[in-house]
Image (cartoon, coloured by chain):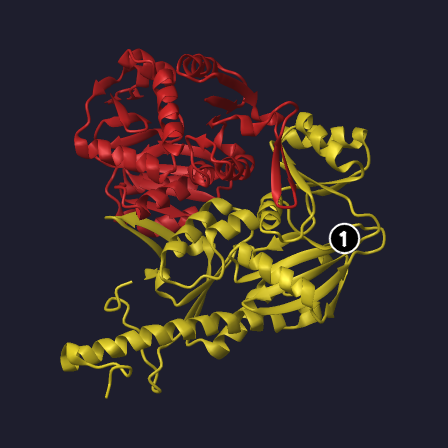
Amino acid sequence: MNAAKTRKKKKPNGQLQTSLLIIGSRKYKKATVKALLEEARKLFDVVLFVPISKIKIVCDKGETKLLYKGTDLTKFDACYPRFSINDFVFKEAVLKILDKSDIYVPVSLLAYQISNHKYYTVKELSHAGVPTLVSSLFTSPEAAQESINEFGFPIVLKLISGFAGKGVMLIHDKKELKSILDTVTLYEEFISAQKFIEGVNSDYRYWVIGKKVIAAKRTGKKGEWRANISRGGSAAVLKPDPYMKAIALDASRVLKMDISAVDFIETPTGPAIIEVNFMPGPFKDYLGNEVPKAMVEHLHAVVKRRNMVKGISAEVKELIEKFGKSVKTSSSAE
Amino acid sequence: MNVLLLAGNKTDVISGLKKAFSENRFSKVTYLNIARLNLITKGTKTYVKDSGLNIDDYDAVYMRVKLSFAPFVEPLMDELADKSIYTQIKRGSYYINSNEPLQLITLSQAGVKLAKTAIVADPRQINSMVDNFSYPVIFKSFKGLEKTQAIVLESKKQLSSQIDSLRSKVNCVVVREFIDAPLQQCAVIGDNVFCIERRMTDNGLQELSKGRFVKLSREEKKTVINAAQVCGCDIATVKMAKGHVTEVIPDIKFKVFNKKFSEDFYSLVAENFAKKIGEKK
């Protein structure tokens, strides 16, 4: 971006102002937004939350703008998009614009597309040597046989765009499989299959926020094989295991996500990733504001670092204008 | 050279392509319904499975699968790219081309000329913009990836009225200034461009089969090829009016173009594939 067009205001101490934009969905959980905004106001000079329903994209005379009440949103220092997979058509367009702008965004369009696709996530991570479960993807009952040959029963079927444990089914035999597949293919859904790990109704969530990692263990309610809190499960905060921490950081790096939540299960051969979340919830009942605080601190740290670079460039430019090209650097000074 | 024709049900187009590939130096030409495929990821490898299929046998895959299959096709295309198997559509492109607003942004950001366009999630946001357009405009609404409506609106009043009258839930609305010029529908096959011009009649846009052949200027041809490339396609239909691109579709109407140009477009595709495979080797 042209520095002249985006002249940033300086604070009395000479440092550049910092600004944060948070974009959320229409049906955004207000508690999480509130916590993020509360933390953001402690660190950022300008903080704005914009519901995605209020955003306009305009393509005109060769320019593509992301607008809210006439303001070009790409002029902010950082943006944290908190998007679910619902209504993704417009969200993908927004992320595409953010990707190409100068604004810092901790997650990209590609990260959104891959992390919201349960099989694609596993595939990318697996190829990078990150431990995951053997998984398959198919679109028809006819193709399911290859997966059954691979995994045997019981098998876990996942609709690739499901979340919060929805669209995840445990199938015990061929009859159950046929019934489910016939229903699912009627709606042209895509199905990922994995081997079921017996005796495990708990998993681990590792939030990765920059280089910081926060961990919790989730346990499903009695009789429920999924561990999601939204399905009646509970959580306990943990000290991150060094090995799982390293895997979680690796997974986020592979998917190019500076903020994510990595879900693991224990298998006979060690922990394996089952999914990576683009829009992780903060488990407020167990962690208070720790996750939103860490998110905002990370965003602020990145903006400060980027501003330092911009600040130096602006100062050097000023010196050159004042003294001409004969300005010496410290390395060549006598 | 060997090519796999990956599609939904077998159609006349697939049969035409199969014949053309066979007659153009391709010794093995196989049609497969994509519904038969399985992708299985184990460790650092992904296997493309159908009983008896060995994907490594093929130099190229002609992908003729509907765009709504993007969630299956995209991971598959990764595998094909990693094995240096040529496809006429690049990875990432199914996602781009299945989402019209995303396609428009992609084109705009790449400097492809578009008519003035507004895109919103909530149609009511358009109300504050009605004065900003020249009329008529084209109004499109989407529910998921599916287009629920596409109509021409002649005035601010009609646009406001259209927004107020939306009954069913929509996730996205695109409003674009209408370019008062014939629509140029171009078939792009590599560096070759063939254009049929369709005029507006009293009954709406002329059918493609009734349009007339036009020769594009060098600049227009460059625009069309660029638009196809930006959308990741070596073979595509690019729609344009007065130099403004309106849409890119990763497929062509073979039957109409074959008849209109007295050319065998199936053969042109096969030749293009042979050329691309040769370039890779």
| Left or right of B156 on screen, residue B141 | right
Q: Is residue A220 above or below residue A334?
A: above
**Horizontal and vertical percent position of residue B48:** 60, 32
The quarter of the image holding the C terminus of chain B is: top left
Query: On the rendered image, what quadrant is the N terminus of chain B found in?
Result: top left
Q: Name the residue nearer the viewer: A85 or A33.
A: A85
Q: Is residue A296 above or below residue A152?
A: below
Structural crowding at the residue carrying mark 1, measured as other residues with C-alpha within 10 Å and reported as few (<14), some (14–19) or many (≥20): few
Q: In front here: B58 or B120?
A: B58
Residue A202 vertical position relative to residue A11 in the rendered view, above or below: above
The residue depicted at 62 percent of the width and 35 percent of the height is B47
Q: In the picture provided, is A199 more to the left or to the right than B87?
A: right
Q: Position of residue B253 (x, y in %)?
A: 37, 20
| Circle 1 residue | A269
Q: Which tint was used for chain A?
A: yellow
Residue A121 is at least partly visible in this image: yes
Which one is nearer the viewer's eye here, A29 or B71? B71
The letter of the red chain is: B
Residue A328 horizontal/vertical position (percent): 22, 82
Local SS, label 1: loop
Return the chain for callout 1.
A
Q: Quadrant of residue A293?
A: bottom right
* Residue B242 visible in the snapshot: no
| Circle 1: residue type | Thr
Q: Tell me the residue at 70%/30% (across/down).
A: A146
How many marks the image carries: the answer is 1
